[in-house]
Every structure is written in C-alpha cells, then in structure tokens.
Amino acid sequence: MSYRVDVQRLTVRCRVGGSAPPALADVSFAVEPGRVCGLFGREGAGKSTLLGCLAAYRRPSAGTVRVDGDDPFENARLMSGICLVDGRGGIGVDESTTVREVLEIVALLRPRWDQAFADTLLDRFEVAAGAKVGQLARGRRAALAVTIALATRAPLTMLDEAHLDLEPAHQATFQRELRAEQAAHPRTIILAGATVGEGGDEDADGLDDTAGGLLDDVVLLGRGRVLATARAAELRGLGRELTGEADAVAALVHSLSGDHVLSGGAAVDGGAVGDALVGAAVSGQAVAVVADRRLGRLRSVVLAGPVPPDALGAADRAGISVSPVGLRRLVTCLTDDRLRSGEHRERTP
C-alpha cells in the first residue's frame, strides 16, 4: 500500500521575528504512490519543515498538503500510515529506554509492523536489542531509526537524514534492504538530506552502478523554495565537468550558455536568476554553470543541462577534458547557491 503526496503552494512562516523569511515559500510538488523520492537541499533549505507538515507535526501558514487525498493534520486514518524518522532513533522516549522497548512502542502504533523483519535488521546493523537508546553511538542510533522506518512498512515512509548517519559498512545494507522492501512491499518513500548519500564513487554515479538506481524522483530545495523537480533517471547524465586552460574553457562555456547564464557574474542577481536557471537546466532547456574552480592557469567548471555532441568535439579539439558528474556531486552543486553565485570559487594565483 502506498500514499500519493500532493503539496500545493505550501508556505510556513517562522514564528520568531515578523521580518524573518518563511521557512517554506510557495512550495509545490507531488510524489506518485510507490515511488522513492530524494528531497535535497543545504541545511536551512526547509527539508525538515516540509517533512513535518507531511507528517502532521505542524500546520502550514498557507497552501495545502494532501496525503492519499486528505489533509494529514489530526487525521486518524492517516496517522498510522505515516512514518517519519531522523537519525536520533529514540522516537521521543526517555534515553534509558532499551531498543527492544522502543520497538514494542512502535509496534503498538503501526498496524503493518513486522517484528521478525525488525529483528533481522537489528542483527544486520549490529544493534543490540537490550542496549539503552542513550548509550547508542550515532551510527547505531541511525540504524535504529532506519530499522523503524523499514519495518513499519508505512504507506508513506520518510527519513530525515537518518540514512546518512549510518556507518559506512551499513550503507550498502540499507540500500539492499530498501530495494528489496520496495519490490515486496511497495510504499511511498522520501529520503531527505543535504547529499544523495547512496554510496558509490561520486564521479562515476554510484546510483547506477552500486545502488541500482534507488531514487525514482528528485526534489531540490533552496532557501525554502523548490528549485527543480525531476525524474532521477533524467537528472543522471545532465552533469559534465570541463577542465582545461582557463581561456579555452571560458570560450567553450560561453558558446554553450552565453553570459546570461554564467554563474558568478553580474547577471546572477541575489540568487533569484540562478534559481530559475537551475530549473531550466534540470528540465533540459538551458546549460548552466553550477560550479567554477580555478587552479592557476587551469579552470574547471561543472555544467548542468544538455551538452550537444558538437560541443564535446570542440572540447576535444581545444584540449579540454570532459567527464561525467555523478548524481551526488551534481545535486550538491545545484542546491548550493554559494557555488552557483561564484562566492565559493576556488582560485590560486
């Protein structure tokens, strides 16, 4: 069983300080039932606030949130079918509570709970059932949270960076278990974080080779707004890194995008134009520079968007190397407005 998620023009205003910008502003997107959606953005982008609205922890200031067609806030039908965990793993209980007792509490609240599966996961994540929550190291706490999320089998399951806190040895275990769960018990899953965090070489898109294309959809957040939404399969392959002599790289980039889409220039006004370019690049309507680094006479830029074959030939003739950018790195570049504005350009004399 899976729930569809619909968010329309969602706005959440901060409660402290009337002049503070909203935590979320006019956010709209949808996740189809049975899909795995990656929700990405820098710290402060609004990810946790958005998940809190989906989980009915708070009401929006404006706009609508619909889960399985209904408003989830104080909705008894939906509450048992929505699960949100973060990396703390304690679900708000006293830290003297044992792992086993935490799972007993969850089992009372979740009608689809699978205790045998939870026990298997604890064993694979090397979490002792008798350990107290307060004594668990960070990675083990995250493993407890991930165990709850998977074994709950909630039609809407959301992980707020919990999977990112897993120990490296357990990342692959999580990915395998999630893929197996989706095959056997499909549900709607939202994985939130500042990075993709799904293993593999970021320069060789581990999502295709290592994680088997775990994500179906991607939502990119920046400063409380949706920068872009895309199918993950379409987003992979949109990133290219060009490295070569600075003037040659600049000339090729200009031929591809023009000054009006170059990052780090006067055309990028306060990030607003840059945000629009992210959406255009992700949708295949533009080529945008999303990261720019200079090392002496060399220049390296990351492009997002469709690069035509003739441009690749021109790069080869100019002695410019062109390499694919993995989804993890591309997402980081697209959501980091400091990189896109040129604020964090790396230069050496």
Image: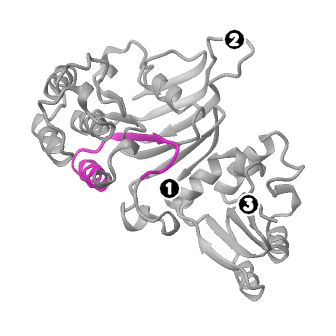
The tag on residue 292 is 3
Q: How many neighbours does mark 1 have within 10 angstroms: few (below 14), some (14-19), or many (20 or more)? A: many
Q: Amino acid at mark 1?
A: Ala
Q: Earlier in the sequence, mark 3 or mark 1?
A: 1
Q: Quadrant of the N terminus?
A: top left
Residue extending furthest front?
349
Left or right: 199, with 121 as reference point? right
Q: Quadrant of the C terminus?
A: bottom right
Q: Position of residue 92 (x, y in %)?
A: 31, 18
Alpha carbon of mark 2 to alpha carbon of mark 1: how far?
Answer: 37 Å
Per the image, the residue denoted by label 2 is: 17
Q: Amino acid at mark 2?
A: Gly
The tag on residue 147 is none
The residue that appears at 79% across and 54% down in the rendered structure is 263
Q: Position of residue 179 (x, y in %)?
A: 29, 53
Q: What is the span of residues highlighted in magenta in the rendered image?
A: 172-197
Per the image, the residue denoted by label 1 is: 232
Left or right: 57, with 277 as reference point? left
Q: Amino acid at mark 3?
A: Asp
Q: Nearer the viewer, mark 2 or mark 1?
A: 2
SS of the residue at dot 1? Answer: helix
249 is higher (above) or lower (below) than 218? below
Q: Position of residue 90 (x, y in %)?
A: 29, 25
The residue that appears at 55% across and 22% down in the rendered structure is 64
